[in-house]
Image (cartoon, grey):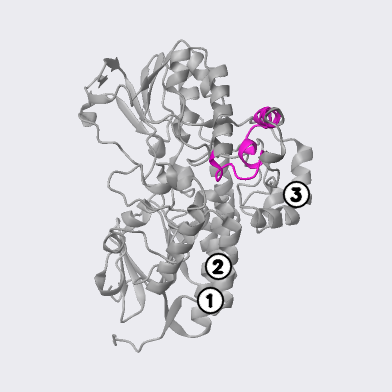
Amino acid sequence: MTENTPQYDAIIVGSGFGGLYALHHLRDKMQLNVRAFDGAGGVGGTWWYNRYPGARVDAPSSPFYAYTFSQELVDEWEWTETQTSQASVLAYLEHFAERFDLNKDIQFETWVTDARYDEAAQRWTIETSTGESASAQFLVCAVGALFVANRPEYPGIDDFAGECYHTGRWPHEKVSFEGKRVGVIGTGSSGIQAIPEIAKEAEHVTVFQRTPQYSLPARNRPLTEEELTRYREDWDDLRMSMCKRGGWPFKTTRRRAADHTPEERRALYEQLWEKGGIHLIIDSFVGVVVDKDLNDEVSEFVRGKMREIVRDPDTADKLMPDYYIGTKRMILDNGYFETYNRDNVSLVDLRADPIVEFTPTSVRTQHGEHAIDILVLATGFDAVSGSMLNLNPKGRAGLSLKQKWDNRFDNYLGSTIAGFPNLFMIHGPGAPGVFFTMPLGGERTAAWIADCIGHVRDKALGAVEATEEAEADWDREINSIADRTLYPETNSWYMGANIPGKPRQFLGHLRGSQYFDRLIEVAEADYEGFVFEPIREEGTSG
């Protein structure tokens, strides 16, 4: 850091839902001097990058996948569909940034390439891809839970000479599939959303399926003016319900499977399947992701629906998942399984016919060769921890996060890390993340971070830091919740299982409303689990 290095109260990395709200809250509500940095060309975070065909929120989202703190913002934005498209989410975030004049304090097309904590100064200094540096007492990392694209290392993949796109890094200009042979690797959320749209245009689509997935019908439809009016009029109650019910205003059922006959249960499943969305999981019976017998019954019901939809029995067999439904990210689709009834779509099950190598014009599997002109990698992300490790801040004594997180992603409250004073994360490991409505989760987490920063400043303190004991207790708390469910029994990105060599660790807090209650409890207990340092005299060290 030099004398000419710009000085701020707080630096924010990222301008998605969490970063934008953190900027608004710290700057406008607390009157702090704040600067945000983002490698993208505009606001939006994940939604700036994920522009693939069919990209939508994985939930019946409108108008709940949005900020909740401002009635005026709710009243003025016109949501149009029950399942929000990527374009609509991005337009909403652009509107939010413009409405609150946030862009003037965000430096776009600027990657933070290094971040180091100065123990003597009790400040963070960052270096950027533009050759600049900046310093702040606090560093807020809103780097995204689903940002670092996972690119598989198949033999020869770099030799493929055609067009190649990752769904998490989609071009901003239109990609034309007309008359093209397209190969799609991956059938997670982005693959299941993209494949039906690509198939409408392409000459042929070959889907290379790594793991069969459950998917529920989204039943996306236009929102009516009457619905929007009702949501706006009831917004305070809806927001309270969202905070109490895992981020969505939907009541979860208290109905018990044992109190109903198999015929009654089947009739309810049929009703909820027609309703669409995640209602089959949350509105059927208590304990779908806890009770193995109940989960097996719901899983088999969905597999039966898949067999009804897909006309070719061999293809249907390849599509049958065998994990516990709900223990991977629950996907909503708009005609995914119906797509396999098209003459221009074929399925390769990589479990039985693995990829051997790529050539400049094809994919060779163990039992065949598939000519393609375009390759789409719908292969997901190094989720939750990947973005922070990509940033790799250096804390006390130069300890890097990669060193700290070599074996486990130790942290406290999903927001702070021992050895990294004055650093905060939004949607870090151990936070609810995708198990809660992420905009509301980001909003509430950023507000808690702002309160903690306010506490440090009001008390004229120099630094706040989690203790290692608090990290260990938090790890036990996260696992005690997860271990009472079926989640740990499935190899998913929730467990880090999609990335070779990644530590196996459950990455989320399954009880979102309880999580935010814990944040409040910690603050009210004078920030239990944290240690505070007084402001040091300039130039001293300890």
- On screen, residue 406 versus residue 417, left or right, reads left
For badge 1, the amino acid type reads: Gly
Q: Considering the numbered disc 3 on the image, is that residue within a helix, a strand or a loop?
A: helix
Point out which mark residue 454 bears: 1
Q: Is residue 333 above or below residue 427?
A: above
Between tags 2 and 1, which lies in front? Answer: 2
Q: For residue 491: magenta?
A: no
Q: Nearer the viewer, mark 2 or mark 3?
A: 2
Disc ID at residue 232:
3
> SS of the residue at dot 2?
helix
Q: Which residues are magenta?
A: 265-292
Q: Are marks 2 and 1 in contact (CB under 8 Å)?
A: no
Residue occupied by mark 2: 519
- The percent coordinates of residue 431 (x first, y second) are 49, 58
Q: Which callout, 2 or 1, points at the residue further toward the start of the chain?
A: 1
Q: Amino acid at mark 3?
A: Arg
- Which residue is at a point 48% across and 85% down the rendered structure image? 460
